[in-house]
Image (cartoon, rainbow, N blue to C red):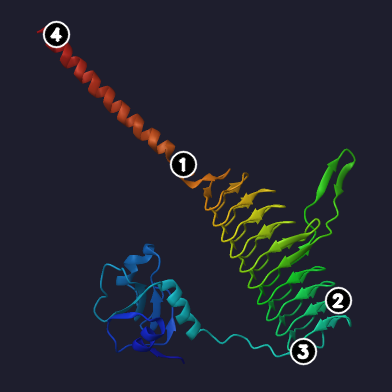
């Protein structure tokens, strides 16, 4: 069992100790479920009151907190409790699986594929002709890698993922299970004789340090490439359509979708279940709220919400209108009553 004293913990996190110092912790947990040997953290003020009720021996809190720990409790003052807690979790976490270099006997690999000997190729992997896989890549069971695809160094591609022909993956990329990359884009033309399929002859390029969540899909370009740039983080069940470009260090969050030929700027955030229409440009640093429907370009740094999406200030104003109108109606009714009373007083004075 791993153990840490509070003083050791404070040195690791560069955090000031408030409260008892003779405490040893052996694990991590939430404020609600923590026990007297656990470390927990507070980063969301929604749970502020739980500081008084949690069983945690040590809680990581912000330096600007406005109260002190109860007797017998210990807090560590951190610049960012959330980031600090991640470090603690890493210390107590179970060791990551170790994948030995080598090829499982059940893997089917074309003789023209070039695979560095340091790679791990798991059971039932299929690797087609012309594939190149660089050092220390980990390809887990059931993965399919199509013709002439390229996989960078130290990538991890999880179970049952499919990479279609000519997919390019950079270095240090993590692709979780059941991802589909490089399928045909949704390209069709309605004609008097029925729906005609438009050939999709492009490919997908994914740059370094990208992470793609489970069950996400990225379609190949109609021609040219669908392009996920360096540092992009995609949640589970995200869909990126043909010829989309996603800028560096952007985040696409669960169940959002980006339609064909749209461009997401650097450092943008597209929140859960938001939809970006086709041929839309979302500027650098823009934020699209959950369930927003974007049908027009979003400027750099814009914060948009609603369906159809609009600047968040306008959206909140419009959302508040019914309440505002209700308040105004009450005020108007009160004013009418006051006016009636004033008229009565005036009439009374006139009659005197």
Residue on which the image places disc 3: 117
Report the front residue among 239 and 280.
Answer: 280
Q: Say few, some or many: other residues with alpha carbon within 10 Å of mark 1 (under 14 / 14 to 19 / 20 or more).
A: few
Mark 4 vs mark 3: which is more N-terminal? Answer: 3
Q: 266 or 100: which is nearer to us?
A: 266
Q: Whole-percent x and y of residue 47? A: 37, 65
Q: Earlier in the sequence, mark 1 or mark 3?
A: 3
Mark 2 to mark 4 CA distance (whole Å): 103 Å
- Evaluate if marks 1 and 3 touch, with contact meaning CB atoms under 8 Å apart: no
Q: CA distance from mark 1 to mark 3?
A: 59 Å
Marks 3/2: CA distance?
Answer: 16 Å
* Mark 1 or mark 2, whichever is nearer to me: 2
Which of pointers 1 and 3 indicates the residue nearer the eye?
3
Q: Image check: 281 left or right of 345?
A: right
x, y (%) of residue 249?
58, 65
Residue with the mark numbered 2: 130
Distance from label 1 to label 2 (Cα)? 56 Å
From mark 1 to mark 4, how far is it between C-alphas?
Answer: 48 Å
Q: Earlier in the sequence, mark 2 or mark 4?
A: 2
- For residue 310, above or below residue 85: above
Q: With 255 as the anchor, is 350 left or right in this view?
A: left
Where is the C terminus found, in terms of image quarters?
top left
CA neighbours of label 4 inside 10 A, class few (<14), some (14 to 19), many (20+): few
x and y, in percent, of residue 289 in the image: 53, 53
Q: Which mark is residue 319?
A: 1
Q: Residues within 10 Å of mark 3 (few under 14, many from 20)?
A: some
């Amino acid at each position: 069992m791993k153990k840490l004293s509070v003083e050791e913990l404070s040195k690791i996190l560069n955090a000031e100790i408030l409260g008892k110092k003779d405490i040893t912790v052996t694990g991590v947990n939430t404020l609600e479920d923590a026990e007297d040997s656990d470390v927990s953290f507070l980063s969301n003020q929604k749970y502020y009151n739980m500081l008084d009720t949690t069983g945690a021996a040590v809680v990581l809190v912000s330096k600007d907190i406005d109260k002190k720990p109860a007797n017998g409790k210990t807090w560590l003052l951190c610049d960012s409790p959330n980031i600090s807690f991640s470090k603690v979790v890493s210390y107590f976490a179970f060791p990551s699986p170790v994948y030995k270099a080598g090829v499982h006997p059940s893997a089917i690999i074309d003789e023209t594929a070039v695979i560095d000997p340091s790679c791990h190729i798991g059971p039932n992997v299929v690797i087609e002709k012309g594939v190149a896989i660089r050092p220390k890549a980990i390809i887990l069971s059931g993965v399919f890698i199509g013709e002439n695809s390229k996989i960078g160094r130290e990538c991890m591609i999880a179970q049952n993922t499919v990479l279609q022909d000519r997919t390019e993956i950079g270095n240090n990329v993590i692709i979780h299970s059941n991802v589909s990359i490089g399928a045909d884009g949704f390209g069709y033309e309605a004609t008097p004789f029925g729906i005609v399929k438009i050939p999709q002859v492009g490919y997908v390029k994914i740059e370094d340090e990208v992470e793609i969540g489970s069950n996400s899909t990225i379609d190949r370009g109609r021609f040219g490439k669908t392009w996920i740039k360096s540092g992009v983080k995609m949640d589970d069940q995200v869909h990126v359509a043909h010829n989309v470009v996603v800028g560096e260090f952007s985040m696409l969050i669960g169940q959002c979708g980006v339609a064909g030929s749209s461009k997401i700027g650097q450092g943008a955030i597209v929140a859960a279940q938001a939809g970006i229409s086709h041929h839309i440009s979302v500027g650098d640093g823009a934020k699209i709220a959950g369930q927003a429907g974007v049908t027009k370009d979003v400027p750099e740094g814009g914060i948009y919400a609603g369906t159809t999406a609009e600047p968040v200030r306008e959206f909140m104003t419009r959302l508040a209108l019914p309440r505002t109108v209700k308040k105004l109606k009450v005020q108007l009714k009160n004013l009418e009553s006051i006016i009636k009373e004033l008229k009565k007083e005036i009439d009374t004075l006139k009659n005197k």
